[in-house]
Amino acid sequence: MNWDDTRIFLAVQRERTLRRAAKTLDLDQATVGRRIAALELALGAKLFLRASDGYALTSAGETALKSAEKMEQFANDLVRQSQGVDNRLAGEVRVTTTDSIAVEFLIPAIGRLHAVHPEVKVMLNTTTQLLSLAKREADVAVRTAKPENPDLIARRLARWPIGLFASKAYLKRHGEPVAGTAFAGHDLVVYQPHLSANRAHTLVGEPLQGGRMVSGVYSSLMLRAMIKAGIGMGELPLPFGERDGLVRVWPERSTAVPYDVWLVTHQDLRHTARIRALIDEIVAAFRQNA
């Protein structure tokens, strides 16, 4: 079982369909199907069963999976360790963060990096999903949670209080909410993942049940845009609300948990020149603008 066969096997196991696996591998679906059939023939074992919801591993497939994951780990380690001694200020760096952090901090950092080192290409992925640095899905992450993996190096870039914000136009129409009324008579916009995670349904400690839930969004940038448009009130880290010209409602209140921003990379990559150069620009962007 060579590495090329292994990555195809792992893609089918993770994506559950040939079509999705082919997309992640940048291959056509027929090729993936043929390679899986050839692998099963070479091993003399059926690795997958076709179920109603896609491909499912057989008992032989489960056994093969353990070895395949070890092979993947070794391959990723080899690439990271090779990159770790790369002194060229050229090549690709993959970065993942949220859309608001990208707009305010990473895009200016990338611009400054390009002005000095034009041969470095930054692939920016703005997503709420936690991409794996250990599996080389990204080289650098700017996250709002500190990772637990001991192989990752994390540096806190910022810690901001989270307050309640509204636009001037909204407050002119509706007035300020009265504390203790659970937002009675007011329109609210919320970051939906917080509600989906079964957190207490409050904004800066005030219950929501008296208010009208206008929208739940999955993007911090869209949350900011809705509050700025006067659609409703919502929670934001203080620097974002202030940058958008919003009014902080109940300035004495903030959430129990602040908004932390962490810069994360794998320890094998910390000395790679192009990654180090981008990290330095990101750190500078937070120092100047946070």
Image (spheres, rainbow, N blue to C red):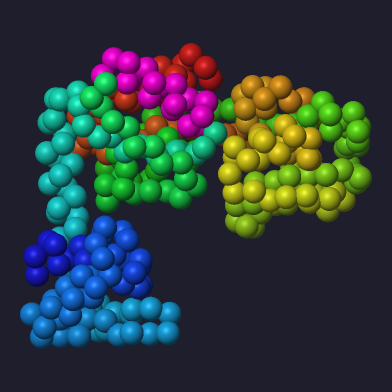
Up-down: is 135 above or below 21? above
Say which residue appears at 73% left-offset and 50% top-offset: 215
Residue 220 in percent (x, y) is at: 59, 40
| Number of numbered discs visible in the structure rendering | 0
In the image shown, does 95 or 195 lie closer to the viewer?
A: 95
Q: Is residue 235 left or right of residue 2?
A: right
Across and down, in percent, residue 139 comes to 29, 39
* Image-based side of 183 in relation to 134, left or right: right
Nearer to me, 89 or 140? 89
Q: What secondary structure is the stretch in magenta mostly built from? A: helix
Pick the residue in front: 113 or 14.
113
- In the shown orientation, is residue 112 left or right of residue 168? left
Q: Is residue 254 visible?
A: no
Residue drawn at the location 39% of the way across and 21% of the way down? 111
Q: Position of residue 43 (x, y in %)?
A: 10, 80
Residue 70 shown left or right of residue 254 in the figure: left
Magenta stretch contains residue 115? yes
Residue 140 is drawn in which quadrant? top left
Q: Where residue 201 sits: x, y (%)?
A: 73, 51
* Any part of residue 119 in sight: yes
Q: Is residue 239 magenta?
A: no
When the figure is inspected, residue 46 is found, relative to residue 212, above or below; the finding is: below
Look at 59% across and 49% down and name the residue there: 218
User: What range is drawn magenta here?
Assistant: 101-117
Can you say which quadrant of the picture contains the N terminus? bottom left
Q: Quadrant of residue 203?
A: top right
Residue at image coords 87%, 43%: 186
